[in-house]
Amino acid sequence: AAIEKGGYDHFMLKEIFEQPQTIFDSLRGRLDAKNGTLTMGGMREYAEVLNNAKRIIIVACGTSWHAGLVAEYMIEELCRIPVEVEYASEFRYRNPVVGAGDVIIAVSQSGETADTLVAIEAAKEKGAIILGVCNVVGSSIARLSHAGAYTHAGPEIGVASTKAFTAQLAVLCLVGLKIGIDKGTITPQRFQHLLDELEQTPEKVAIALNLDNQIKQIAAKYKDARDFLYLGRGYNFPVALEGALKLKEISYIHAEGYPAAEMKHGPIALVDENLPVVIVATKDSYYEKVVSNIQEIKARKGKVIAVVTEGDNIIPPMVDDVIFVPAADELVAPIISVIPLQLLAYHIGVLKGLDVDKPRNLAKSVTVE
Ligand code: G6P
């Protein structure tokens, strides 16, 4: 087993550290930044339907659903197509209004999640076109899909998804870029810029992984907290949800993810000196707003752990702990900003002596209802 883990203590840590490679693998053969081209073989046959979609519905569960939320922001920006993101279990039971002209993107690491599978079966019968974004080649969801783009993250053993998530983000960005450039809803300049940005993500993720020791120290400081709040806005809002989910799964600490501004409508009531608040506050179009959200928390004595962009000198003096990540375009920033949150959950789980690879009550793939 030690050999399988490649020298790491746990599969989860091994998979977290594999991400520079797995993200590279998800882009390989598709993105060619030097020549400014993007080839999505599994979308070719349905290119016209995809480009003319009236709307896109993303259907998924768990971490894959969080990737879907990021994709909603990406695809609406790049393709100007309205996108909805649905929990598969909710979508399938309400006789959804769906049919010809709709494109369903099914996001699933395993490709076997029962709710996602049944949801797309129903939508397919009603005439929707299914684009599968799966990790496991030949899985049920992949086979049921008309078109697809595999994530190529390799086998994921840790129950809490890590490398599959970042590969999903990379591939969903490629899907948006492909449709966007075909439709002309993004400029060639923006297209080229995002190809370059994506190409640089493996390297930036590797830099973020160097924070491991620092994050272990932060983990030791907060591991006994009863609750955690995770906040982010825009592209980083789903990252907050994912950070909270990772912590819950691995450490059994109650954690809630929220859009930072929505905090005022509830979670702010929980803020006191005992509540650690993890804020993803990288430099993007929401930055100024997030800075005021941090002030609101500090005014109530919350402990703030902020993930910020390298070079930021505004937020660090305001907060309790600061984690610097490399600068990136906001569209690809989640691929990088989620790394410290994965590490934080991992280290808290380990420090609490828990089985991080096999958390209680959870399954790698939920193939029954
Ligand atoms: C389970 C796993 C999660 C995963 C979710 C969806 O809950 O523990 O890690 O995100 O299922 O699985 P899928 O294979 O469809 O992505």
Image: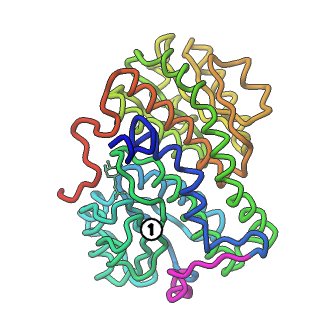
Residue 156 vertical position relative to residue 34 in the rendered view, above or below: above
Residue 108's x, y, as percent?
38, 61
* Residue that numbered label 1 is attached to: 133
Horizontal side of 329 relative to 10 (left or right) equals right
Quadrant occupied by the N terminus: top left
Q: Magenta segment, which residues?
A: 37-50
* Crowd tier of the residue under label 1, counting other residues whose Cα lies within 10 Å: few below 14, some 14–19, many 20 or above: many
The main secondary structure of the magenta stretch is: helix
> On screen, 45 above or below 58?
below
Residue lying at 51% horizontally and 46% vertically, measured from the top left: 238
Residue nearest the observer in this picture, 305 or 77? 305
Residue 43 painted magenta: yes
Question: Quadrant of the rendered structure where residue 231 is?
Answer: top right
Q: Indicate the amino acid at tag 1.
A: Val
- Residue at 58% from the left image edge and 81% from the top image edge: 51
Q: Nearer the viewer, residue 289 or 321?
A: 321
